Structures are given as C-alpha cells and as structure tokens.
Amino acid sequence: MAQSADHVLDHFDLFRGPEYQQMLDNKKEFENPRDPAEVERVKEWTKTSEYREKNFAREALTINPAKACQPLGAVFASVGFQGTLPFVHGSQGCVAYYRSHLSRHFKEPSSCVSSSMTEDAAVFGGLNNMIDGLANSYNMYKPKMIAVSTTCMAEVIGDDLNAFIKTSKEKGSVPADFDVPFAHTPAFVGSHVTGYDNALKGILEHFWDGKAGTADKLERKPNRKINLIGGFDGYTVGNLREIKRIFELMGIEYTILADNSEVFDTPTDGEFRMYDGGTTLEDAANALHAKATISMQQWCTDKTLPFIADHGQEVLAFNYPVGVSATDDFLMALSRISGKEIPEELARERGRLVDAMADSSAHIHGKKFAIYGDPDLCHGLATFLLELGAEPTHVLATNGNKAWDEKMRALFASSPYGRNCHAYPGRDLWHMRSLLFSEPVDFLIGNTYGKYLERDTGTPLIRIGFPIFDRHHHHRSPVWAYQGGMNVLVKILDKIFDEIDKKTNVLGKTDFSFDIIR
Amino acid sequence: MSLATTYSTAQIRARNKELIEEVLKVYPEKTAKRRAKHLNIHEAGRSDCGVKSNIKSIPGVMTIRGCAYAGSKGVVWGPIKDMVHISHGPVGCGQYSWGSRRNYYVGTTGIDSFVTLQFTSDFQEKDIVFGGDKKLIKVMDEIQELFPLNNGITVQSECPIGLIGDDIEAVSRAKSKEFGGKTIVPVRCEGFRGVSQSLGHHIANDAVRDWIFDKDDPQSKPRFEPSPYDVAIIGDYNIGGDAWSSRILLEEIGLRVIAQWSGDGSLAELEATPKAKLNILHCYRSMNYISRHMEEKFGIPWCEYNFFGPAKIAESLRKIAGYFDDKIKEGAERVIEKYQPLVNAVITKYRPRLEGKTVMLFVGGLRPRHVIGAYEDLGMEVVGTGYEFGHNDDYQRTAQHYVKDSTLIYDDVNGYEFERFVEKIQPDLVGSGIKEKYVFQKMGVPFRQMHSWDYSGPYHGYDGFAIFARDMDMAVNSPIWKKLKAPWKDVPRPKLLAAE
C-alpha cells in the first residue's frame, strides 16, 4: 500500500506505483489488446508521408477540429452588454456545454439560459418554450436585456425568432418595450466566430433599426466617437483593458461594443456578480452616431462591419494586431480617424518592444513555428513571428476560408521569412499532426489541445489561443498592441530557453551548453 | 458556522420551509407551482424525499442539466477506449465534451485507443438539407483507413440526426457487413430526447444490449478461462482513476474483475460481461438498465455498492463478498483490516479540521447520496442535496439510507435557487459542477467540483479516501477565505436568519 495520510499520493504518482502497474498489466488479459508490435508498426506508419497523403485526402471525417459552433460565439458576444442574459433557443444540453466551456477557460462563472426544448417542441415548434422561457428568465434574473440565439435543433425545425419574440411579448412574457435582440446561429454554418458576428449584428440591428418594427429607426447624427469590436477572443479581459488604456491615453471618445472584459474577471469578495460591466444599452444604440467602427478581428465581423458601413460609418478591420507593425497600423488608423496624435508614452512603449525584440531576436530568428487557431489570431501571430525573423511554417485555421488563405499567402509573400510558409484553411489538428511529423518545426503555438500534438510529435507547445484549460490566468494579460506583443515575446522566449535547458541538463553528459547566461 | 450545532432540527426545518417559500416567490405562478414539487425538506422515516423528479426542465430558469448526447457519448460510450465514437452532426457537441470528463485509460492514443480524440462528421448546411447518411458512410471508410486498429465504431447522434430522418441503423448494418462483421453501434441519443442526460444513459445501455449482446453468439467461449470469482464493475467511469482504486480492492479480496463499464473499458470487456458471476453496480442511475437486462437474460445477479469513504467501503466489501464463498468473505475482512491503519491515520489527521462542517451537494448520477458517507467519516454533515437527473428510485435510496431528517432536497435545481439556498444556509462547503464552482467561490463559499473531482481523484476506495479527505480540508480550510474583504471594508458576516 503506497497511499499514506502523511504524504497523500495524487493520481499522477499513485497509479505509477508497482501495485497499480501490476494490476493494469493483468487487466490486459481481458481487453483483447492488439499485438504491441502491430501497435508500434501502425504508430510509425502514422508518421509517414504516405499516411499524410491519406490523411489529407479525407473528405468527410473531422478529427480534433480547432473550432466550436455558432451559439458559443453568440453567448460570448451577448454577455458583453450591460445586464444582458444570453438565451439560447433549442435543446438545453448545448447551454450546459457553452457555460462549462467558457468557465473552464476563464475560471469564471458563465450565465446563460436555455429554452429547454424536447421531443414535443421538435414536433410542434418551440413557441411555448420561448413564451415561458422569457417570462421565467425575466423574473428570476432581472436582466436589462435578453439576447436570443439558437441551437441547431431550433434551426433544423425552422423556428422563427422574430415572430416568437413578438408573440411572447404579446402574451406578456416581458414588457413590450423590453429589449430582446435575436440572431439565428445555426451550428452547421461557420463556427463560433460566425456566431459572434451574427449575435453582434443582431444586437446593433435591434437598437439601430427600430427594434424589430416596434420603434422608430434611429437617425444617425455623426459624432466624434470611435466604436471598437474585439471579436471572439480568449484574451478579451486583458486585450479590451489594454485597448481602453490606449484610447484614454490618446484622449479618444470611444465605445467598446460587446465589452465582456469585466464579466469574465469579477473579484472574489463575497458577492457573485452575475452581470458586470458591459456596453450600456444606451451606448449600444448611440454607437450608430460614431465616426467609425474598428474591428480587431476581420473574420469575427464579416456581416457586422458591412451592416455598420451601410449606416454611414467608416469601418476598418484588423487581424488581431500583435507586435510592432500591426500595432503601428492600428494606432495610426486611430490617429487618422480621431485627429488625435499618438502620445509619446505609446512611442516609448513601442521602443521598449523593439528593444526587447532586438535583445532576444537571436534566439528566435530562423526558428520554425506551426500555429493554429481562429483565422485572425493566426494572422496576428504569424505577422509578429515574421517581424522576429521566425518562420510561421504551418498556419492552420479549421474555420479559415479561402479569403483567409489568400490573405495569409499575401502575408507570407511580404517577407523573406515567409517563403516556405503555408496556410491550411479548413484543416484540423489531425492534419497538423501529419504536418508536424513530415515537415517538423521547432515550436507549436495553439490552445490546450495542442498538448496532444506536443506529446505525439515532440514539438514544444506555446499556449496561445482558446480554449486554454490547463494553464491559469493568462487571459488577464493582453496580447494586443505593444505591451501585448511584449507578453507574447516573453511567452515564446520562456519556452525556447526552457527547451534549451531541458536538452542540456543531463549531469555528466551535457555539462556544456547548460549556460547561466543566455 | 455550522448550523447543526446552533439550531435544533425543528428550527432548521422551519428555516428550510421559509427558504423554499421565499425562493418560489420569484417565479411566475405557473412556474412556482411546477418548481414547488421539486423542493422539499426530508422527513425521517419516509420512503422517499418527497420530490418529483425526472420531469422536463422549465425553459429559461438556468437548469444545470445536460442532454441525452452527453449521457451517451459523454458518460456511457465515450470511455470505451478501443472504439471510435463519432459525434455525428455539427461540430459543437463533440468539441465541448472533448477530453473534459477525465475518464482515465491506458493505451496508445490515436493508434489503438481513442478516448481523447474528437471525431465528428462536422455537419454543414448541405448535410442538413440532403441528409447525412452518405457522409456517415464516408466517415466510417476514413476511420477504417486511418485508424486500422480500432475495434469498433459508435455513432453518437446529435440533435439534427433524428430531425432530418437519417437512417444511421441501415448505414451501421451495411458498413459492419462490409468491414467483415466489425462492431458498429448506432446510438439515437439526440440531445432533444428526454429531459436530461438520463435518457441518454438508458439509450446507450439499450444500444449495448441490441448491438453487442444480441449480436454475440451466446455459445461463444470467452477469451479467458472462467473462474467462480469473476465479477464486472458496472457504472464506474474511472474519473481520475476511480475504477482502478476500486478494482485493486476487489482483486485483493480474491475476486477477478473481467470487465470495467466503462472507464478504461474495451469492447472485449463489454462482450465478456455475460460470463460474470456477479455484476457490481456503482452508478445505479446510468447503468441499472443493462444490469437488469443481464439479470433477466443471463441470470447474473447484481448488487449496488459504494466505495466512497471507509464506512461504506467496508459495508460494500462485505456485501459483495456475501455473494461468494468463505475465501472471499475472509478476503474482505483481511482487506478491511489491512487498510484500517490508513483509514485511522487519515481520520486522525483530517477529522479534527473538518468536524461539524456542513456541506451542500448538487451533482448527478450516484453522488448526491453516495458521497454522504465519506463526509460523515470525516465528521462533516450534508445539510442539502439534490440530483441533476435522478429518478424517484434515486430519491428512495437517498431517503432510506443516506440523508438525515430536515435535510433540504432540491431536484433539478437552477442557478437562482441554488444561489439563494447557499446564501441563506451558508454551508462550509458546496460540492457541485464547473458551472457552479465560480459562482460560490465568488460568494466566499469553499467549493469542490464533484463531477471531475476538481481535476484531482481518485475518490473511490481507500487510496481515494485519503485524497478526498485532503481535498475537502484544502477547500474548507484554505486561508484565502479569510481574505475576502479588504480590511478597511471588513464587516462581520450577517448572521443566518438574523434578517428574517
């Protein structure tokens, strides 16, 4: 018996002891296991280019995708408005999944309700679920707004949100003038970034275009403000706070649309804040009058930006600006639109990032990276790596499309370090596995699921992306702008140095190269 | 502060009654009427907890429940390690349930074991419009080609499958034939079926019956020589290694475990289970169906057991041994004695730190009752409990064997109710899931996830009890709970009932 009260053995140690190892060995008799030699042969075969070819020929099967479904993005966007309760119309299990997923990443509560549709609703439609659901949510959780989206069940049976919400109001579920914006978010179209886009557009449309026929359309009276949309972002807490700091430094009047930086980072002080922070509903409506709207993620605002442009604003999209040039472009755009100068303080921050890159670039220059994640994140990180003289050799976005592919190619073509780099739209992490075996790189950048790739291929993983379940609190630090670039740089460097140390720490074998100064 | 030491049972009963009434006030009338049936105060001597259960959740209330897909793919089938489980439909379901349940297994992942891979048919609009059967056929072909050492395939249906009229059974039959009789199991666990995960368990159990047992030749010989001591562990998902820290005890008393359902389980083990002399059932809720079936069809008796905490472990080992001869009975006594010093050491160390502390639970499966004994072994008291997807037979077992008089019972509790209950009762610990964890920690209430063991475990068996005790102590007595208020804002916590 290895367990003891003095030194309680956790699962990592307990099952590695001889008693359990023997037990697990004996269990094999009942498992009908494959011949170990055969397992070894197939394992090696999966590393070959022959396997890669078969793997890339897949047409139907998706294995380990790096994307989620639309309603997740809709929920993420909705909680960015003050006092807003996301309400997902359809099966209830979906909502349990979104809430768990967001909580596991942010280590925060995630509040969202479902209309809990079951078999009868599949036959008769979910109108009654909407009527009862809105009434219950309104009474129990006292929201300022309920933002409705859909699961694939409601989409397949064709429930009409506009009509359902109207009927619910007539039946008195919520007051007639209570804000219930909506968006259809079918899980079988696009991904979570599409859902973000649809939900945000739905909310703006609600406030700007007459609240589904129940109010007058707002008339745009241009002012000096600038709207900013962050997009679906695992670093929303750190990033939006950084953006606000920059706006304030520059003296720009701004509105962050879907500002969920507070609700995903509430204090522990004895009070549970179901709602916190967020774009006020008044600001959401008044955002119509802004001079311009900036999206930090082009592929999170495919529909929202044209919608805003149609209302007469200048719109501008970035691709997750990380590093020097992307931040330069962002700040110069801000300056141009607002007419405000970029303050010296930001120039100094820029200088510090350049300083840090100059100090350390010898360790990054020429290193090969594989990156996967959402399309904009991939573009932003690849841009930064190219600035560092590194090669983003494989860049993969399961939810990337053809336009993304073209944009990535243009990025690679713009730098000598991009010469041997490729983008992989619509591919998954099992494809990435083949890439890492057949064309190895030095480091992998991705979310928590990258740890399986790290284990299988030995490529060290730098965790940047969403979700990050197995490391804590990184979402609180920005990755955008100069200071964010500094954080990303340090993250990459730490991994590089750790790897060099790991390779040189065998006493009696590698006493050389185990340097104190690097 | 613990209530039990301050208030009489009658006072607690009165407070709980008032609390339920207060909570119900928030609802529209119709909802209040429905929810009232799910909330109660347990009366000693009653045969059940006096609540309705296994009824549809009410729209818009923020139920904690999941769906049938979660019950089948996430719970029952997902852990079977040598089969490929296809999340059939859009990408989300498989993505959100990918690797999050911690069913540990031993194997070469991606080669002969597939538990922590996410296989999906990733439905697009055209698959909805034209049907997904053609895609499913191709998915299976590609699995066969790229994962040649898989021992079988299951199709875990997501919502659209049942709505668009796909015939996954026909596809499964045809592909099984084409692949030389390979086990391919279609599972109709669409998320809109039933009222919670629970129907998914049942559907998954039935799928084992129909697509594995019924296809096996009953005269076929097992791959091993049968013994009189062969048992199967049913309803242990090996979360954090639970089934292993249970198996080791069963083997130590002289039994031979021929199958694990389904944590670290394999197709061969499912197939061999009808050869067992006794099925021992941990999670009654999710696997009583197949146990009853094996009793009826193969004459295999089954017995429930509880491996949380030394009191219940000893009771269970003796109960299980009771089905066998003196060799096993003596084995049980020997094992109980062997672990007594560990038990004593754990209790000596942790009980003084936990004595009198109160706990509120809200979990799924067997845990709203099964863990109560383990808390009591540490001197703690469970003052409120409820099931996410329990049925009346769960509440009967709870009432008859576990909870004390005046315990607050809440079936299918929602965010609002749970928050109010905890706020008023102020337990020393809440045990529930990830969606609840941060809510209560923000409120300053120590919390442990009792689905995933908060990334710890195992909690089963004697080895697990040491970890359980350590974890509960760590949560309840963490120094951080004394730092909630900035010192310049520090005011005494409002006393319970004081405001009422």
Image (tube, coloured by chain):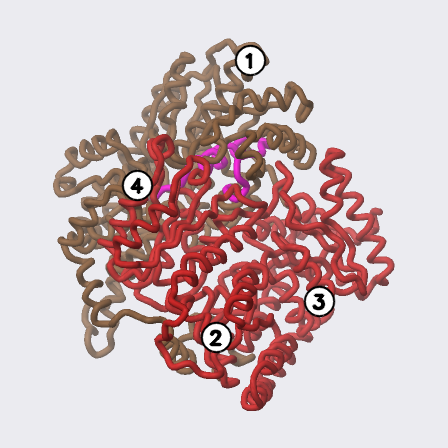
Chain colours: A brown, B red
Disc 4/disc 3 C-alpha distance (Å)? 49 Å
At label 1, which amino acid type do we have?
Gly
Which residue is labeled 3 in the image?
A: B402
Return the residue at label 4.
Answer: B135
Distance from label 4 to label 2 (Cα)?
Answer: 39 Å
The vertical placement of A26 against A441, above or below, is below
Discs 4 and 3 carry the same chain letter: yes
Mark 2: amino acid: Ala
Amino acid type, callout 3: Tyr
User: Helix, strand, or loop for circle 4?
Assistant: helix
**Residue carrying label 1:** A213
Q: Is residue B413 left or right of residue B302?
A: right
Q: Secondary structure at mark 3?
A: loop
CA separation in Å, label 2 and label 1:
67 Å
Classify mark 3: residues with Cα within 10 Å, few (<14), some (14-19) or many (20+): some
Queried whether the magenta region covers residue A83, the answer comes back as yes
Q: Residue at x 30, y 65 (%)?
A: B108
Q: Secondary structure at mark 2?
A: loop
- Residue at point 42%, 81% (across, down): B226
The magenta-colored residue range is A66-94
Q: Which residue is mark 2?
A: B276
Residue A7 location in percent, x, y?
A: 51, 78
